[in-house]
Image (cartoon, rainbow, N blue to C red):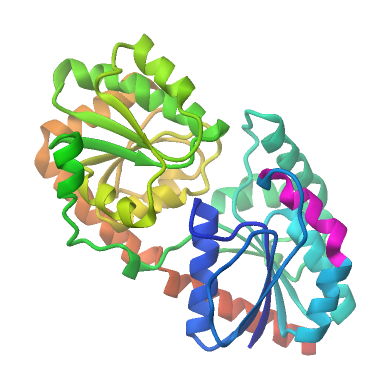
Amino acid sequence: MKILYITSVLGNIGGSEIYCRDVIKEMLKKGHKVLVISTEPFDFKHKNLEFFQIPFFGHHAFHKFTAPFFYHKIIKKALEFKPDVIQSHSNSLMGWIGDKVKKELNVPHVLLIEMISADNHNLHTKTIFALEKFLLPKLKFDKIIVWTENMKKKFLLPWGIKEKRISVIPAALNKSNYDLNAKGNKVKEKYGEHLIISIKSLWTTNIAGLQYVVKAMKYVKEKHPEYKYLCIGPGDSSALQKTAKEYGVGDVVLFPGSITNKEKKEFWAATEIAPHSYVYEFSTAISLLEFLAMGKACVITDVGAVREYLKDSALIVKLDEKAIGEGINKLIENPELRKNYEKKARKLFEEEYSIQASVEKLEKIYLEVKNKEKE
């Protein structure tokens, strides 16, 4: 099948980017021909892959807003490629471009929306939410895919999108990238034997969630001062460092900064407990999926679709620094419980969140909309 893949997220850094990369690679592995049209660079080479970068300007966060200005160039590339199906990915602006191509080429269009949250903490996310609410009901996609039932029931259905046009396919990752035999010895030698670790980009919404974890370390330090929390990721950690100092945990909360993909594997392996605190309506986080894939015990705040997504494979607590701290202490003090969560985490990932299963579901949808187009 020839797939035209339009996306504003793609690459080796960032959760959405990694998911999109893995989806495209798996499609190529299965023999599909793919034309990737993206605002972001893609250095992967394959005989069945073509790539066209949408012209862009300004900060990468705004590339999605500038992309629609170049839809004529995208249509030209699409006409040359002659796809069987159009897949737009990430947001309604990519969906708008997908609709333009669908109208011009008369081929089916599938739109994938990763996250919708009514709880937004900055102008950027508030703007995205307003766009999704305004545009999604107006677009002519043949099928829209979201990551959770919560997104479907809380947003799409109330916005007037018919249920038959909606499919739920969870986010996923390539299992082969997560080595359970890794040891993390170099990380432990540098930072200590007992490590609590999170790895995610330090941008506004993530920082708001991570503040809870930093504050929670006050309760961990009181009982288990031998444990250190490594808050890893690119971005500005100054606000988190200030909080750590104010709460008296500057000695046990460390900020290693950006790490390479190779280094990331060592940090995953060195992790005893992985805390995840969300202040938006959780649909999923690739950083969380990565810790599940590595079979790590996670403490997660009960936000959005967390329970739908994790079932009983992690310790779920309320969005409160004391509750997070007590949850971490519970796993420190009960090694058997921690091991139980580790086993459940990897099992859940293998059964429900592998990229192979995700792409198989996408293929079925492509065939469904393609066959419907012929009727």
Q: Would residue 360 be seen by someone viewing this image from the given angle? A: no
Query: Residue 59, located in which quarter of the rendered image?
Result: top right
User: Total number of numbered labels?
Assistant: 0
Q: Nearer the viewer, residue 67 or 56?
A: 56
- At 29% from the left edge and 11% from the top edge, which residue is drawn? 248
Q: Quadrant of the N terminus?
A: bottom right
Provide the residue span drawn in magenta.
61-71
Q: Is residue 215 magenta?
A: no
- At 75% from the left edge and 85% from the top edge, which residue is drawn? 81
Q: Find residue 136 and report its horizontal and vertical position in percent.
A: 77, 54
Q: Would residue 44 be seen by someone viewing this image from the given angle? A: yes
Determine whether, in the image, residue 245 is placed left or right of residue 221: right
Q: Nearer the viewer, residue 235 or 361?
A: 235
- At 39% from the left edge and 22% from the top edge, which residue is drawn? 320
Asked if residue 26 is positioned above or below residue 217 in the image, the reply reads below
Q: Main secondary structure of the magenta part?
A: helix
Q: Find residue 66 and report its horizontal and vertical position in percent.
A: 80, 51
Determine whether, in the image, residue 123 is placed left or right of residue 357: right
Q: Find residue 205 and report its horizontal and vertical position in percent.
A: 55, 33
Q: Find residue 35 and report its horizontal and vertical position in percent.
A: 67, 78
Asked if residue 155 is positioned above or below residue 10 in the image, the reply reads above
Asked if residue 233 is positioned above or below residue 169 in the image, the reply reads above
Q: Quadrant of the C terminus?
A: bottom right
Query: Residue 20, located in which quarter of the rendered image?
Result: bottom right
Query: Residue 338, located in which quarter of the rendered image?
Result: top left
Q: Is residue 62 magenta?
A: yes
- At 50% from the left edge and 51% from the top edge, which residue is drawn? 14
